[in-house]
């Protein structure tokens, strides 16, 4: 199995369900990994590939909704598809609010599950791509010197080089040089591009002193 | 000499009384005592005795005489020796006022020896002289109660002084006669007693007794017959049973019953219906007793027991059982209703497996390069899951069914395990941790498996309900099976729920008592009646800490066979 293959995790305490889902998932072209309890799943190391979790709501010990909370906090790249033998409305609402992709009541059709998995993996891929992008952005930002960060913070608020120089008490020439380094290190094509990056990095503009 | 035995006064003036026990003896004698017949075999024996006496003593006549009740005015020769020259034939009657030797012996209750009557003024005109019997030796013969029965005597046509040996012989023969009389009297009184008992039984037995002849005509009825069927004895006697008390539609049955009553037949019983004089049907249990010893054309007895009350009690009992069954069933349905989540879960798991396996198998087969091994495996799993689902259905169906109570061998471990499996979903939903401690080698009990499962289910769901509001401690359920003293087997369900106040323990098992908001208060009450019908008991103990334990125990009978 190539490392790029998406993994579909299954957590269900019932062997009939686990054993039937594994071949189906394999048919869909994904790698199934199944567990009988939430704890077994949590003990398993994560892989940097698109993944999703097919999760039974009622589990012995840590139940499905508890596990969802843990996953939502720790594994944002792993969307959850709930399956349940007795889904009631409050439970469904709670699960969907907490970000579940789908809530399927057993027995469900294979198409419903496969399309839910497809959708979940797409979401996972997006999250992963976004994460990759963010990571690159964060890496670029990390390469800036403190002075360059100061310059960047002021530039993205729309100040002219002269104004930036005035703010920082340095020469306009120096500001220009820093700004060039910032654009280069951040791999920004234009000022608006840099502004978008700043927003993504969630940099708070330094209030005017 | 024999005379020494009896010291009595002669009552010349009152012949009748004089024959009865003397005042000195102090014996109360009933002169009205029923006459005891001397049976033919006794008479044969006595004949042999008088024959021997005549032969041994070389006398022409040896005789046994019997004084005749009720007025004792004459006596009869009942045995007389077959010897040459014996002038006294059997059945010859003598009046008690002609002065015979025997008359004297009877009246005086003393033996008498007359060597030659012709030489004695007192006897020379005695009637015996006229038939040539001049000498006499006689002993009185007594009934066991002291009354005179008669005499045994020998007579000779010449002077005879009868040696001591002869006297002793005759006295001994007299004793033999008295022994026979004693036996006869005892048999007689026993017979009388039996007759009295039978009459009393006939009169007092709470069953109608009819004596019928071979034409089914009523010969005799007892008072209960009148009570049960309304006809007096006068109305009944002479009528045919089928005409009197048979309902029109049962004529044939009555006749066939009577037809079976042949003297050689056995006793037989029938439950049927007869008719009262007022036309109302009377349910009866009928017993036919053919009698062969009755003679005179009587076929036998028919005994009727009035079953009206018994039938009513049986109906009541049956209705009560039906109601109990209904209640148990209703409780079961209600209880299973509470299991809906469990049941859905139990069924959905295998159904999910089935559906997914089938669709996966289909995908594998319709693929461009079909995966036959994978499809085969999927089908195999499908079958396994289908079997699993059908087992769930089977378990449920027995619980749902309304049926008669059965007695079968039940393994309480298995029974309890099944119930836990059925309610596992419910328990998981309630976040209850279940622990089981099952005893090894638990003896089987005899009972109704479904009802016992119902009890365990009630206890489990009660425990669950008791813990549902508990959030400050683990919701822990411990289910144990155990062997108890006195050859009992038990199940206990221990929870960590809200428990109950010790003083409410008796109320817990009352119908309609509930502490739950939506409870009916039937569960424990039905459970207790189920356990009691298994001869067991169901009880509850609140814990010192949190929760309570509910237990039941029922006797196990390892060697009992189920019918």
Image (cartoon, coloured by chain):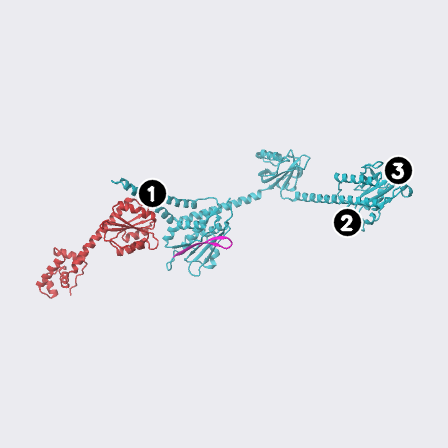
Chain colours: A red, B cyan
Asked whether B298 or B235 is in front, the reply is B298
Question: Where does the image place residue B506, in percent across and percent down from the top left?
Answer: 48, 56
Mark 3 closeness class: few <14, some 14–19, many ≥20 residues within 10 Å: few
**For the residues tagged 3 and 1, is the chain the same?**
yes
Residue B558 screen position, x and y as percent: 50, 49
Start-end of magenta stretch: B475-492
Q: Is residue B361 visible?
A: no
Q: Please tell me whether mark 2 sits on a helix, a strand or a loop.
A: loop
Assign a secondary structure to mark 3.
Answer: helix
Check disc 1 and report the residue beneath it.
Answer: B380
Q: Reading the chain from its start, which is encountered first: label 2 or label 3?
A: 2
- Give the residue at mark 2: B28
Cβ atoms at labels 1 and 2 below 8 Å apart: no
Alpha carbons under labels 2 and 3: distance apart: 40 Å
Task: Give the mark nearest the N terminus, 1 or 2.
Answer: 2
The local secondary structure at tag 1 comes to helix
Closest to the observer: B362 or B161?
B161
Q: Is residue B488 magenta?
A: yes
Please state the chain letter of the residue tagged with numbered disc 1 in the rendered image.
Answer: B
The residue under label 3 is B130
Disc 1 to disc 2, C-alpha distance: 104 Å
Question: Horizontal placement of B79 versus A190: left or right?
Answer: right
**Is residue A6 located in the magenta-colored stretch of the structure?**
no
Mark number displayed over residue B307: none
Q: Which chain letter matches label 2?
A: B
CA separation in Å, label 3 and label 1: 128 Å
């Amino acid at each position: 199995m190539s490392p790029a293959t998406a993994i579909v995790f299954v957590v269900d305490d019932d062997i009939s369900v686990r054993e039937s889902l594994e071949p189906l998932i394999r048919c869909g072209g994904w790698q199934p990994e199944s567990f009988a309890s939430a704890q077994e799943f949590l003990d398993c190391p994560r892989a940097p590939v698109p993944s999703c979790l097919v999760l039974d709501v009622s589990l012995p010990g840590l139940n499905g909704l508890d596990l969802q909370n843990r996953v939502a906090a720790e594994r944002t790249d792993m969307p959850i598809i709930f399956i349940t033998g007795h889904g009631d409305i409050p439970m469904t609402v709670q699960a969907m609010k907490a970000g579940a992709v789908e809530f399927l009541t057993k027995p469900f059709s294979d198409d419903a599950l496969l399309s839910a998995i497809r959708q979940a993996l797409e979401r996972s891929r997006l999250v992963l791509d976004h994460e990759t992008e963010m990571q690159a952005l964060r890496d670029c930002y990390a390469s800036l010197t403190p002075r360059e960060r100061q310059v960047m913070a002021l530039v993205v608020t729309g100040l002219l080089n002269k104004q930036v120089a005035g703010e920082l008490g340095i020469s306009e020439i120096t500001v220009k040089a820093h700004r060039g380094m910032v654009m280069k290190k951040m791999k920004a094509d234009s000022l608006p591009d840099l502004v978008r990056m700043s927003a993504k990095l969630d940099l708070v503009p330094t209030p005017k002193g | 000499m024999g005379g020494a035995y009896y010291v009595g006064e002669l009552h010349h003036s009152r012949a009748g009384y004089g024959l009865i026990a003397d005042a000195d003896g102090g014996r109360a004698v009933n002169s009205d005592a029923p006459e005891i017949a001397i049976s033919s075999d006794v008479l044969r024996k006595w004949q042999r005795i008088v024959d021997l006496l005549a032969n041994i003593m070389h006398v022409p006549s040896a005789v046994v005489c019997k004084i005749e009740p009720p007025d004792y005015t004459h006596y009869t020769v009942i045995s007389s020796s077959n010897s040459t020259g014996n002038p006294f034939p059997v059945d010859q009657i003598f009046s008690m006022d002609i002065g015979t030797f025997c008359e004297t012996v009877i009246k005086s209750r003393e033996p008498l020896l007359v060597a030659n009557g012709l030489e004695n003024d007192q006897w020379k005109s005695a009637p015996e002289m006229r038939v040539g019997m001049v000498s006499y030796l006689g002993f009185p013969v007594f009934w066991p109660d002291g009354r005179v029965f008669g005499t045994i005597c020998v007579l000779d046509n010449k002077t005879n002084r009868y040696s001591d040996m002869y006297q002793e012989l005759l006295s001994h023969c007299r004793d033999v006669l008295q022994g026979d009389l004693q036996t006869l009297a005892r048999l007689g009184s026993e017979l009388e007693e039996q007759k009295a008992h039978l009459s009393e039984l006939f009169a007092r037995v709470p069953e109608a007794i009819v004596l019928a002849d071979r034409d089914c005509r009523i010969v005799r009825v007892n008072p209960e017959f009148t009570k049960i069927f309304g006809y007096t004895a006068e109305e009944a006697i002479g009528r045919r049973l089928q005409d009197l008390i048979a309902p029109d539609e049962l004529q044939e049955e009555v006749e066939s019953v009577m037809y079976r009553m042949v003297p050689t037949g056995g006793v037989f019983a029938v439950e049927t219906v007869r008719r009262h004089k007022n036309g109302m049907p009377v349910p009866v249990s009928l017993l036919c007793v053919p009698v062969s010893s009755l003679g005179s054309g009587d076929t036998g007895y028919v005994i009727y027991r009035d079953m009206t009350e018994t039938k009513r009690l049986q109906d009541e009992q049956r209705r009560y059982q039906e109601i109990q069954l209904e209640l148990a069933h209703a409780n079961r349905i209600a209880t299973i209703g509470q299991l809906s989540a469990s049941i859905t879960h139990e069924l959905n798991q295998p159904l999910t497996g089935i559906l997914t396996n089938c669709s996966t198998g289909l995908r594998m087969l319709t693929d461009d390069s079909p995966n036959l091994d994978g499809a085969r495996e999927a089908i195999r799993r499908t079958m396994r899951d289908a079997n699993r689902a059908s087992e769930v259905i089977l378990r449920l169906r027995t619980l749902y069914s309304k049926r008669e109570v059965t007695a079968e061998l039940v393994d309480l471990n298995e029974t309890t395990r099944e119930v836990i499996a059925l309610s596992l979903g419910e328990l998981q939903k309630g976040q209850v941790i279940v622990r089981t401690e099952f005893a090894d080698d638990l003896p089987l009990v005899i009972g109704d498996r479904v009802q016992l499962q119902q009890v365990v289910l009630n206890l489990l769901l009660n425990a669950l309900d008791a813990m549902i509001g508990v959030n400050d401690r683990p919701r822990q359920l411990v289910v144990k099976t155990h062997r108890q003293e006195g050859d009992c087997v038990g199940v206990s369900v221990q929870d960590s729920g809200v428990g109950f106040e010790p003083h409410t323990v008796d109320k817990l098992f009352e119908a309609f008592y509930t502490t739950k908001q939506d409870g009916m208060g039937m569960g424990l009450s039905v459970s207790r009646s189920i356990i009691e019908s298994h001869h067991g008991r169901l009880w509850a103990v609140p814990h010192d800490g949190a929760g309570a334990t509910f237990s039941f125990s029922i006797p196990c009978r390892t060697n009992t066979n189920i019918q």
